[in-house]
Structure formats: structure tokens, C-alpha cells
Amino acid sequence: MGWLVEALVALILLSLCLAITESAPESALVTNLPGFNGSFPSKHYAGYVAIDKERNKNLWYYFVESERNASTDPVVLWLNGGPGCSSMDGFVYEHGPFNFELTKTKAPRLHLNRHSWSKVSNIIYLDSPVGVGNSYSKDKSYYITNDTQTASDSYAFLIEWFKMFPEFQSNPFMRISKRKSNKDVTKPVINFKGYLVGNGVTDPVFDGNALVPFAHGIGLISSELFEETKAACKEQYYKSENTTNECSDLIQKVYDDVRLLNLYDILEPCYHDTSITTFDIGSLPPSFFMLGKTERPLPVRKRIFGRAWPLGAIVRPGFLPSWPQLLAGSSVSCIDDRVATAWLNDPAVRKEIHAKEKSEIGRWDLCTNQIHYTQIAGSMIEYHRNLTLSGYRALIFSGDHDMCVPFTGSEAWTKAMGYKVVDEWRPWMSNGQVAGFTQGYANNLTFLTIKGAGHTVPEYKPREALDFYSRFLAGEKM
């Protein structure tokens, strides 16, 4: 989610009056999904929202009503990062209402997910910006975008979406909460309350300095290499024009030591083959498919295509390539996201979720190479500072085995905010066990780790993820 969420948040701070219209559109109702036999535990909707008068920008969403109490539970907007990655990634692999199970056919089998975030909230999965996932425009110039435009379009989506679903206007909204009392009941006011960011790229210096201490602290590099690198780089591992050759050479040694590990969870295996771009799944040893198993029927992925930034590549202002653009012409290690790709490109599925046909908008990809994205926002720290000083709640969480955006960076920048510690570093519990560690600061800022989790926390630790998510929504202590 990262920087895109904060940019969106900055716009959501504005109060807005919405005109009450009819209730949720029946034409958007999803009543059946290929691979699932049974009744949905709550209502599902999907479709397009045109966000401009000419109807050239069409953002696609999938909305799951809460299984608990849809009329009072929070409405939460889920955004994946990338840039250019579909939020259906979160739906399929992380916290959606279904667990996906591989079968001998191309079609996966769907089971109800007992740790779905729809257990306690209404949740919107939004494909953003235009050109990502099932979102599209007939005018391809809209595929040239940036932080500000993406945030503005997401905000425009929310305005139109609430007009389509007026019965949810009074619900708490994470990033938007319950409206204030208003004499004119036809004009509910949207008020931002809080946000969550998971393993998010935040600041080039703090993120750039995170890997070396992470790698040493978790036992991936020797103490000798760590001390040499620390001395040569003066604890500034972020590459800049002032970096010495000795420092650069030692950082390269660190990269060489860790490069064969799974970037997104160092505990999980990674299949490497440098000679095949799209390798034969049948060539993998049977034992490989037993690795990464959790209580969910679909094992965690041995590769996560396009989920986060490559090792050591810090996000700076300017053109920000997507993973498909970065990897053009080169091979991709490990297993691809074939379950989501096959399912969301199935014509029967596309029909049920009210997505345009592939012949009209192209195939669904987890991360697209259609967009040209420019990052202009820079560091997100001042966004966090402005929001938290204004009284909005923030939960910054990290899987502690993610090497792509190591927790050491998030821990460092939250501490550097300079807020008073109001809840000293301690374990937090889930199901009677230590689930990670947390530190709370003044101004409603909380940092939290999830023990044993990788980059996509709910994929690795579904029970623990639902626990901290539920507590945050309810305003409870971790």
C-alpha cells in the first residue's frame, strides 16, 4: 500500500457532501463464482465506476459486505502497491472471503476463508490506477500517471462509489469514518479517521539503510562483514553520490550473500532457473510443492511477482517502472501467480464479476506493464507527521521476515518521528501466543511486527493478521 495510501489520505481529509441516491445497484451484485459451491456469507458486488464526465476513466472494484453487521461495521478501502498491481492480489492471496485451492484442472477450488477481513469489515478491493487489473480507459494517455493523479482518481472513485452505495455513507470508514452530526441528513460528511500501511516503502534514506542491519540481525551475513560495512559506510547504507567505492563494494558483498533467498520471506524456498523465462511446472520436484504450506489450502507463494521493490533499488522521484517493465527480457525466479492469473482470465469468472472481456481491455495481470508511472511525492514521513498530529490513527505493520521492505526501516522512521513512547516495546498476543512486537507512540502512531511473516502478512499469518486488524478497527490496544 505504502506511498499511494498516504497520497490518497491527504485528499480524503477534505469534507464532502454527497447526494443520497438509490441503494446498492442490483446490476453489480455477484451471486456466483466459478470454483465455489455454496452460499456467500455476505453480499458481494463488483463493477465499474466512471470517474470523469466523459466516462473515459473506468475504475473496477470488488466489494464484500461484512459477514458480521454490514450496516454498522467499517468500510475499508484496500489498495495494493507496485506501482501497477491489482488489489485482487489481496483478495485471492491475502484476506479475501475465499481460500483458493489448486486442483488438477486449471480452475481452482474455492473455500470460505475463516480469517477473511470481511469477518469484521466491509471491504472494497480497488484496481487503481486506470490501466491496472480490470480498470481501463479507451484513451491510453490516461495510463501515464503519477502519485497525485492516482490519489485524485481514487478519491473521485470513493465519491462516486458512495453515491452508488448510499446505505454505507454513515458507516465508519477506515481512512474515512462516521460522519459528523449534520442538520441536513441528505448531506453526510466524510471524515478521515485512520489508516494502516503494511511493509510500505516510505522514505529513501530509512528504507535504504534498512537491509544491512536486518541481514546481520537475523543471521544472514557475518559479524565481520557487518562491522566492515558499518565502518566503511558510517552506518549510511543508502547509496548516494557521496558513497565511497569501499562502501559500495561491501554493500555489494551483502547483496551477494542474500541474493538467492526469497526476497519476500527469507524462511520460504525459492526455485531458481536462469535459462527459462516461463518454466515447466512439471519440472519441479514433488517435494517443492509441500513447502510453504499453512493452514490455508493454497501454500504461500515461492515468488511474489510485482509486489514490492527489488532488493537495494530505492524509490526516488521520477519514472517508477513496474515489475514487468523491470524484468523485460529477463527470467523470473520461482513460481508465478498462476492461480489468480488463470482464475481472473477465465471468461466465466469475468462475466460473474462484471469485468470487461479480454478482447476489449486485455488480459488481467497481477501487475501491469501498461502504465507509465512517475513518483513525485518523495518521502512519506511528513504525510505521516501531518496526519498523526491532526489526531488520525496510524498502524504501521511489518512482517519481520520480509527482506524487500525490512521492518528495520519502518521501525527506524516511526521512532525518528520524535513522538513520546506511550507503550514501550513489548510482545503482542494472538491465540495465546506471541504474535510479534509492538511499540506505541503519542499522537496515535503504532508500529507492529508480525513474527514469522513475510511481505504479504495475511498470506503468511492469516489468524494473527485478522487479530491485529480487528483490534485496530475497534480502537483496541494491541
Image (cartoon, rainbow, N blue to C red):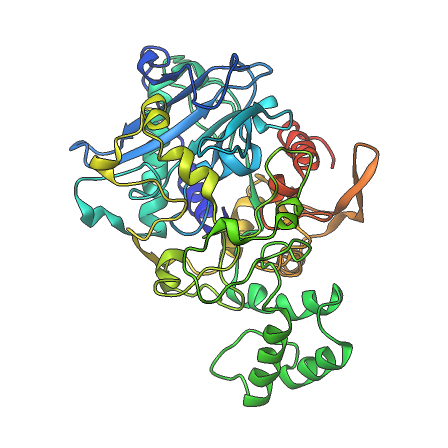
Q: Is residue 294 left or right of residue 208?
A: right
Is 236 placed above or below 48 here? below
Q: Is residue 438 left or right of residue 317?
A: right
* Residue at screen point 66% across, 77% down: 235
Q: Residue at x 45, y 55 (%)?
A: 279
In the picture, the quarter occupied by the C terminus is top right
The one nearer the camera, 68 or 91, is: 91
Q: Position of residue 169 (x, y in %)?
A: 43, 19
The quarter holding residue 257 reads bottom right
Between 284 and 473, the one nearer to me in the picture: 284
Q: Is residue 111 above or below residue 153?
A: above
Q: How many marks?
A: 0
Location of residue 239 in the rendering, given as x and y in whole percent from the top left corner: 52, 76
Q: Is residue 397 left or right of residue 122?
A: right
On the picture, is 272 further left or further right than 408?
left
Picture coordinates of residue 51 (x, y %)?
26, 33
The correct choice, above or below, for 330 with respect to 38 in the image is below
Q: Quick check: can you spot residue 426? A: yes
* Foreground pick, 323 / 269: 269
